[in-house]
Image: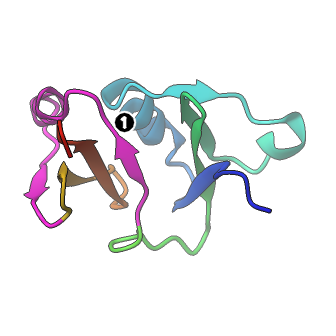
Amino acid sequence: MITGLDHVQLAAPPGSEPALRGFYGGVLGLREAPKPPSLAGRGGCWFEAGEAQLHLGIDPDFHPARKAHPALRVSGLGAYARRLAAHGIQVTWDDGLPDHDRFYAYDPIGNRLEFLERRSGG
């Protein structure tokens, strides 16, 4: 029986770890999680917020995920969108999900990310 979702992994090109740390840790405010020593030599980096983890793994044949994406729950979505915009990140609002406010943005290597918040009373 499945009891939950442990993590989502996105691909990243070799050498992109500084940009990923700046974006996911600095701009998004996620906490970097240490990789186990047995996996650290593979490169990439892991981030977390609460129980949710996002892993960025190095792929020498990297192609950004332009459709597939993780969806990150946010408290105070409007303020969070302004935070990203202040860092030069373009946000694209979408009203297609009932009872939610949401927008999309791209990380510095071109992976798509969704940010959403359930509306009050929804």
Left or right relative to 44: residue 72: left
Residue depicted at 66% across the width and 51% down the height: 4
Residue depicted at 45% across the width and 28% down the height: 30
Outermost residue on the front side: it is 121
> In front here: 14 or 64?
64
Left or right relative to 122: residue 4: right
Range shown magenta: 69-96
Give the image quarter of residue 63: bottom left
Left or right relative to 102: residue 92: left
State whether residue 28 is above or below residue 43.
Answer: above
Asked if the magenta segment contains residue 70, the reply would be yes
Instruction: Identify the coloring.
Output: rainbow
Point out residue 111 in the picture as x, y percentages from the top left corner.
37, 61
> In front here: 16 or 102?
102
Point out residue 93 in the picture as x, y percentages from the top left corner.
9, 55
> In front here: 118 or 87?
118
Q: Amino acid at mark 1?
A: Phe
What is the quadrant of the N terminus in the image? bottom right
> In front here: 89 or 99?
99
- Residue hosting label 1: 23
Outermost residue on the right side: it is 38
Point out residue 18 in the picture as x, y percentages from the top left corner.
48, 36
State whether residue 63 is above or below residue 37.
Answer: below
State whether residue 107 is above or below residue 96.
Answer: above
Left or right relative to 113: residue 63: right
SS for callout 1: helix
Residue depicted at 78% across the width and 40% down the height: 40
Residue depicted at 19% across the width and 53% down the height: 99
